[in-house]
Image (tube, helix red, strand yellow):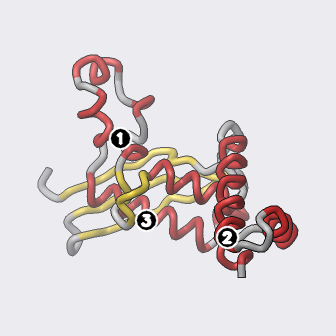
Amino acid sequence: ALREKSNAGVMECKRALQACQGDMTKAADLLREQGLATAAKKATRVARQGLIEPYIHAAGRIGVLVELNCETDFVARLPEFKALAHDIAMQIAATNPQYVGMDQAPAEVLATIPKAELEPLCLMNQPFIRQADITIEKLITEKVATIGENIRVGRFVRFELGS
């Protein structure tokens, strides 16, 4: 049951359950923490594979293309990777971010717009439209923890009819 809930390996689940004296909730929390630590280690790895996800919204009035990168083409074909790309494309259609992250904002924008006002313009800082208590950055970090590869939003473009 823990393996199905966490997508962790059998031995990882066994070790977590042993460490938590059989408590499923504590073991799931432990696996999540370990997964997030693993995700942080993978953040520096090169992600050159992936896919381009298209999304059309509002009867063809808004269109999005998003490049989501991972380390291998095997992961790019996983249903959960494709679902993540689709969710991110929907996020872009709904919220119209201007940049992937703060590091991509031009220097003149950083100098003129306060950080608190700039953060919502950056995709990675936005609350996820399907689960407002996590940001897109955290959503991706959680997927890195379960999939086991570095995942990055490479770039995106959003088209809106008439603008």
Distance of mark 1 from mark 3, alpha carbons?
16 Å
Would you say 66 lies left or right of 151 here?
Answer: left
Residue at position x 35%, y 24% in the image: 106
Percent across and percent down for residue 128 are 38, 58
Residue designated by label 1: 122
CB under 8 Å between discs 1 and 2: no
Residue 98: which quarter of the image?
Answer: top left
Tag nearer the camera, 3 or 2? 2
Q: Residues within 10 Å of mark 1 (few under 14, many from 20)?
A: many
Q: Residues within 10 Å of mark 2 (few under 14, many from 20)?
A: some
Residue designated by label 2: 6
**Amino acid at dot 1:** Cys
Distance of mark 3 from mark 2, alpha carbons?
20 Å
**Amino acid at dot 3:** Asp
Percent across and percent down for residue 69 are 59, 51
Would you say 16 lies left or right of 99 here?
Answer: right
Q: Residue 148 carries which label?
A: none
**Amino acid at dot 2:** Ser
Residue designated by label 3: 87
Residue at position x 60%, y 74% in the image: 79
Residue 3: which quarter of the image?
Answer: bottom right
Q: Which one is earlier in the sequence, the residue at label 1 or at label 2? A: 2
